[in-house]
Amino acid sequence: MLFWIIAAGLSGVVAVALAVPLRQHRALGGTAPDVTFYRGQLAEIDTDRARGLISDEEAERARAEIARRLIAADRTQQAETSQQQSSRGPVLPAAIIGAVLVIGGALALYADLGAPGVRDQPLGDRIEAAQALRAARPSQSAAEAVAPATPANAPQDYLDMVAQLRAAVPERPDDLTGWQLLSRHEAALGNYAAAARAQERVIAIKGETATFEDRLALVDRMVAATGGLVTPEAEAHLVQLLSERLDAAGPLYYMGLMQAQTERPDLAFRYWKRAIEQGDPASPHVELARAQIGRAAALAGVDYTLPTLPGPSAADVAAAQDMSVEDRDGMIRGMVEGLSDRLAESGGSASEWARLIRALGVLGERDRAAQIWTEAQEVFAGTGELDQIRAAARDAGVAQ
């Protein structure tokens, strides 16, 4: 209702703006000042004659002269009035047409781009609707049952190997390595529901020694198994993970995703902003948050600019494109060595240690990556940040 009140008010302003020139145009009519002045002089002559201030002869001469001027002024006024009336004709229709075009065009544009049939949505009603959407989410099993399949193309020998794992691992329920391999390979083939069940078994076998990364991997597989929906079961895991590490990019991203799915872009923006600003830029969860935060910010009415990613500048990238393979590898190694020296001299954050280990793994220097992983376990012992570095060490192939 408030929208239509505002729209009616704006339409009234437009109508007034079009009517003012017409009113001013009509105001040009009426009695000319010269005619009024001469008529007043005629009345004064009669008064002066009655009081004996002028003679009858003088009064007649004055009256004749003023009458001549009055007739001339009256003719001038009639000519101007006739001209105004002849030019007034097209003004009113033009004004009406202009008003119809402006107001009618605005209504037609709103009917096309707006939502005229939608009622007002106060903030309280929108929050209540979002809560209803959140409560109506399907369970994990129900969501998995209707999620589209995402099969991956793989060589037949790889498929045969995974089939052997499926057959052998359930016969050894306490085989931790077997369940870890099964979870990993089922995920690689796009069988995320099976991967989630295997990961649940990994966590059950580990018990209290299950790491933060183990449980985050379970959430990864649960969300993938539902086609991207964050179910109540997945949310329960995320709440627990965030209670342990408030700055963990993975749980922050998924909590933001859940808020976006339940029509709370304002909360999604807050979670994703924290993931971007506090997480490792190399994390896939941070990359996902960066890809989606723009839309959430726009829906939340927030003017947000993504922070610049650390790394080589545009000039460095352009220069690297013109380098030979040997020179490019040398430049990359130089950057890695610079990071290694800086960490050795002044220390650094867990994300920087993880980045160095991951980079050494890419360069094939597994021995150095293993050595730095060993040092990191001493530096970050007893902290939640060690899980982040452990994930990088796994990627580099130097940790379980």
Image (spheres, rainbow, N blue to C red):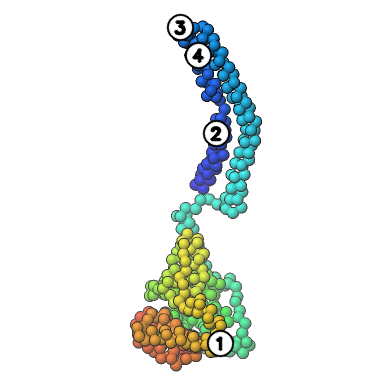
* Image marks 2 and 3: residues in contact by CB distance under 8 Å: no
Q: Secondary structure at mark 1?
A: loop
**Residue 397 at x, y percent in the picture:** 48, 89
* Mark 2 touches mark 1? (CB < 8 Å): no
Q: CA distance from mark 3 to mark 4?
A: 15 Å
**Closer to the N terminus: mark 3 or mark 4?**
4
The three-letter amino acid code for the residue at tag 3 is Gly
Residue 30, image x, y percentages: 56, 25
Establish if 158 lies above or below 86: below
First in residue order: circle 4 vs circle 1: 4
Q: What residue sits right under mark 4 in the picture?
A: 43
Q: Amino acid at mark 4?
A: Ala
Residue displayed at 52% across by 21% down: 36
Res. 237 visible in picture:
no
Q: Which mark is residue 52?
A: 3
Label located before the other in sequence (2 or 1): 2
Q: Amino acid at mark 2?
A: Gln
User: Front-most of 392 and 75?
Assistant: 75
Label pair 3/4, CB-CB below 8 angstroms: no
CA gap, disc 2 to disc 3? 46 Å
Residue with the mark numbered 1 = 324
Q: Secondary structure at mark 2?
A: helix
Q: Nearer the viewer, mark 3 or mark 4?
A: 3
**Amino acid under disc 1:** Ser
**In the rendered structure, which disc, 2 or 3, sits on the residue that comes first in sequence?**
2
Q: Which mark is residue 24?
A: 2
Q: Residue at x 59, y 18 (%)?
A: 71
Up-down relation of residue 250 to residue 114 (above or below): below
Q: Earlier in the sequence, mark 4 or mark 2?
A: 2
* Mark 3 residue crowding within 10 angstroms, few (<14) / some (14–19) / many (20+): few
